[in-house]
Each structure stands twice: as C-alpha cells, then as structure tokens.
Amino acid sequence: MPGPKQASVQLPIIDIYQTILSPSSLSSISQACKDLGFFLITNHGISQDLYNSLYSLSNHLFNLPLDTKLLLGPSTPVNTYTPLFIASPFFESLRVSGPHYFSSAKSSADLLFTNNTTTDYTSQFCSVMEEYGNKMVELSKRIIAVVLECLGDGFEMKYCESEFSQCHGYLRINNYIAPEVVQEEEEEEEGGNGLGEIEGLGMHTDMSCITVLYQDESGGLQVRSKEGWVDIETGEGTLVVNIGDLLQAWSNGRMRSSAHRVLLKKKKKVRRMSLAFFWCFEDEKVIMAPSDVVGEGKERIYRPFVCKEYVEFRQSSVQGRFDKVGFTVDDFAAIIGS
Ligand SMILES: O=C(O)CCC(=O)C(=O)O
Ligand SMILES: [Fe+2]
C-alpha cells in the first residue's frame, strides 16, 4: 500500500550573479530566509563537468578499504574523515578546509594514496578541490552580499567588509550508503518512517553563516517547517543555500537556521553524494547583531558570544554524535524572557 505523500516546498530560485537583483527577487529571498531559511540558486558558475569530476574522484576515495580511510579518522591528527556509524550508520564524510584547499586535500590524499600509480589521482583530486573551494568562496561572498541587502537597504555596503571579511569556509564531501532494500524490521531498528525511507543524516542545524549545498539527483533533503517535514526539491544545475546558526544569531533571529535531515529512499540508487560548503565567522569573532539590524523598538534576543565558544558548546553537547544535536544557538545564547 503506498504511504501518504510527504509535503514538498517550492523554494524561490535566484540567478545569483544577476548584477542588480530585482525588488521582487530580493523580497522573495527575504521571505524565504525568514520562513524556512532555505532558497535555491542558479548561474552559480560551477559546471556539470566539475561536478562529474568531483563525483568520480569522491567515489574512488570512499571505495577505499576502511583501514585506509581510518588513517584520516577521528582519532588521528588529520581528523578529516568521519566513518559510518558516527553521524548515522549510512553516512561517511571527508572534510577539506580553506583557505588553501589544495594543501588541505593533499594532506588527506597523501595518506590515502601512497604508491606511484596513484600520483595522478592525488594531483587531480587536489586541483579539483582547489577549484571547487575557491569557487565556493566567491559564491559565498556574493550570497552574503545578497542576504545583507535583504536585511536592509545599504546593509551590503555597511556590513560586508566590516563584519564578514574574515569569514572562512570548509567543504564536506558526504557519502551515503543505503542498504539495497530497506526491510521493514531494519526500518524499525534504524528509525525508518514506514514510508520505505531511512535516516541518512539526522536532524541538525548548521553551525555556519550560510551553507551552499550540492546534492546528486537522489533527493531526500528535508527541512522542518511549522507544519512538519517538507522535501526540498531541486532541479539540475541548482544549488541549495541555507542560513546557519551564526547568521541567525547575527541577524537577531530575522533569518532562520532551520533543522534539516536527509532521508534515503527505498529503491533509489544505493549511493548518494552531496557536497556541503560551510561559510563561517572566524573563531574569535564576537557575534552581536548591530542595532540597525535588530531594528528600532525591537528587543535583542541573543547575548553577544564568541563564535568559537558556540562551536565548542555544540561539539561538547553531541558527545561524539557529530552534528546530530538537540542543542542550538537558542539554547546557547538566547536571552531568557525575550
Ligand atoms: O547531504 C545533504 O543533502 C545535506 C547535508 C547536510 O545537511 C550537512 O552536511 O550539514
Ligand atoms: Fe546540514
């Protein structure tokens, strides 16, 4: 018997490098940032060829034996690899950090690929990571400019440089491996929802200002709205942008960092790949919404806090459960009674 159909949402799509965004584009993005904190972008400058290369290089890497991948695991000094069974039984990931994406990728690849026949792979992997990382940095700066303009006329000029110029980014290559057929008992055990779907990545909010997400055609990303979980549908060549906790705090809650998760669907292909780029404030930044962002007559809802302290709060709250948390920036910095 087919299960009930899950709701999906049509998010606004903007041509991100359009020189002047029309008032109607800006207002639909403003509304989306306020309601769900998710919108879509096109004309992002990343070619399908680059995604195809990223896809096959990542596949090759995740297909390595577990022992090899664990050379980069959580208990090693590099600590760029998160194996299966940490965030979920079906999720593994590799982190590549900026600003030098080539050398970050190389420090991982050098440990994974040690013989001469793989030298080509290493150099290709590092170059592709560098190209993608640098493009994501440019894109994130542009998105921040647009989002600031959504918050107030002239805010892009006023705050881009003064508040966001020290931002940094890191990339997470996510690989999901679903059991081929999701059995009913397995679903029950692993937290399935009775619709032939299992959780690939549990509910969480992102600890970024913004996240730029590429997902392959498998779908499965859901965001929690007031009415419940809704599917995020994307078309080919479209990237997902979502507001993270840091921007929610900096905007005094005017932009929303929504909880989201990934479901793996029965009968869909067994692997799913996504690339999440997190654009974050520098560790030492004191996050405090400027008074004109708070707005006249409005109460401040977060106390000022140091970015790094929030990141540490999240890491200590999850007890090794990666991003699957019940604690958000509201638990950390909300002013009680506001
Ligand atoms: O894989 C996805 O589509 C989403 C991943 C995600 O939410 C994350 O890495 O924070
Ligand atoms: Fe996320």
Image (cartoon, rainbow, N blue to C red):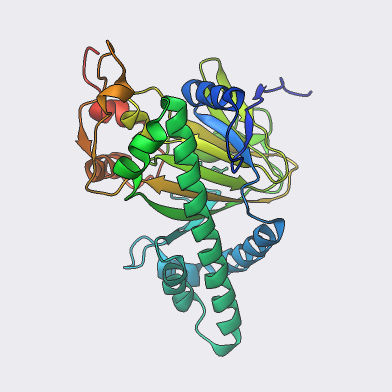
Which residue reaches farthest right? 1
- Seen in the picture, residue 215 relative to 95 is either above or below; the reply is above
Does the rendering let one see residue 203? no
Direction from residue 178 to residue 331 in the image, left or right = left
Q: Quadrant of residue 149?
A: top left
Which image quarter holds the C terminus? top left
Direction from residue 214 to residue 154 in the image, left or right = left
Direction from residue 205 to residue 38 in the image, left or right = right
Does the rendering let one see residue 32? yes
Direction from residue 22 to residue 291 in the image, left or right = left
- 258 or 200: nearer the viewer: 258
For the point 48% across and 74% down, which residue is it?
109
Q: Quadrant of residue 101?
A: bottom left
For the point 59% across and 74% down, which residue is it?
124
- 251 or 338: nearer the viewer: 251
Please state the horizontal and vertical placement of residue 53, each as a whole percent of the image: 66, 64
Which image quarter holds the N terminus? top right
For the point 55% across and 78% down, which residue is it?
123
- 7 or 193: nearer the viewer: 7
Please state the horizontal and vertical placement of residue 19, each as a whole percent of the image: 58, 40
- Seen in the picture, residue 231 relative to 115 is either above or below; the reply is above
Which residue reaches farthest bottom? 116
For the point 43% across and 30% down, which residue is it?
257
Q: Quadrant of residue 222?
A: top right
Please state the horizontal and vertical placement of residue 138, each as a whole percent of the image: 49, 52
Please state the horizontal and vertical placement of residue 27, each as a whole percent of the image: 55, 22
